[in-house]
Image (tube, rainbow, N blue to C red):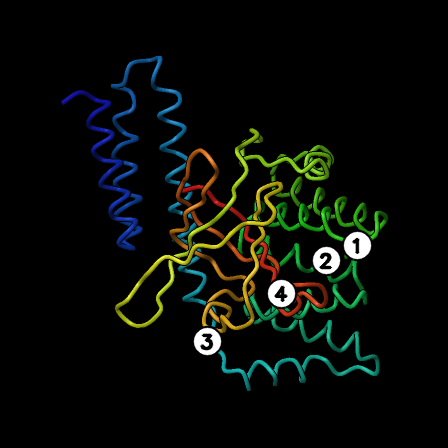
Amino acid sequence: MGATQSIRSLVREAKLYREQGLLEQSRDTYYAALEKIDDVDYEDRGPLEEALKKAIHTVEVELRDLERMDDIPDLSEDMKGLIRRLFSVSEDSEIAKYKGAVALAQFGQYGEALEEFNRLLQEGNMAVLAAKNIITCHLTFASPEVAVSQFERWVLGVQLTPKELADVRRFLERVLERDGVDADLSMLEGLVRRGKAWDPDGEEVLPICSVRLPYKKKAGCERGEELDVFLHAGSAVSIQISPDRKDLLRALRLGTRIIGMRFFSNMAFFEGNGLVISRKQIESGPRQGYYTLDIHVEAA
């Protein structure tokens, strides 16, 4: 068996491990494939090595997420409410809400903290401060890519004024630069405003028109839930869910990572993961009551 065929065999094995949730075995198998890269013909070596390193990075991110979830205390709703009250003693109700959200973030309650900060943002109270804390949550509990994806959605929305948006952009640029992440946010902002979509390497991609979510309707019965995408710009897609789908809405709270999604364009599809970075209910129009969810796309 040639080196390239041997690597492909190991990659198939690594993918199978990952599908079964055996992430450590998947990572180790990808590393075994990477060790054989020097035996591949020179002209094929670069793209193959880059693809292997990208796959290893994706699995390691998932492993870190699992480790972080193990470290985060599983708090009851009563305990979360108590945290809000204990850390939100203030004469100003908005400052109280803000302090309660900060406390939730400090206790590792990622989704709940995002909900509180997003509520402040939607209400227009302390918008810039709330936006910066949302960015900080994504950077702490997710990744720089997710933080950038969140910024892209604000560019498309109306929650922040141009002046506020510029302030948040400068904040995010400073944090990314401090962490050694290279991101031209002014360029991304222009692409988003023109409705362009691209992959993490900055290459323009085919627009995604629908997604399939892995969804367990009941124990032992898993089926795909296919939903139309009404907006794909930047590195995130937007879907809408009926308020009657309470089971699906419970499964897709803010901050939820979705493993094993499928993304469909008119010409092809690919598999990957997603992270719910925004969720709000439509207040008027023909789809009043529906929930809009923004999902950051992570290619597998």
What residue sits right under mark 1 in the picture? 160
Q: Secondary structure at mark 4?
A: helix
Query: From what the image shows, is residue 250 above or below residue 214?
Result: below
Which amino acid is tagged 4? Answer: Leu
User: Where residue 186 sits in the image (x, y, percent)?
Assistant: 74, 35
Alpha carbon distance from label 4 to label 1: 16 Å
Category of crowding for the residue at label 3, using alpha-carbon neighbours closer than 10 angstroms: few (below 14), some (14–19), many (at least 20): few
Alpha-carbon neighbours of circle 4 within 10 Å: few (<14), some, or many (≥20)? many
Q: Amino acid at mark 1?
A: Leu
- Mark 3 = which residue? 74
Q: Amino acid at mark 3?
A: Asp
Q: Quadrant of residue 89?
A: bottom right
In the picture shown, does residue 252 fall above or below 93?
above
Instruction: Kindly indicate whether the residue at mark 4 contacts the one at mark 2 (C-beta within 8 angstroms).
Output: no
Hey, which quadrant is residue 272 in on the image? top left
Q: Secondary structure at mark 1?
A: loop
Residue 131 — which label? 2
Give the position of the C terminus as an image quadrant: top left
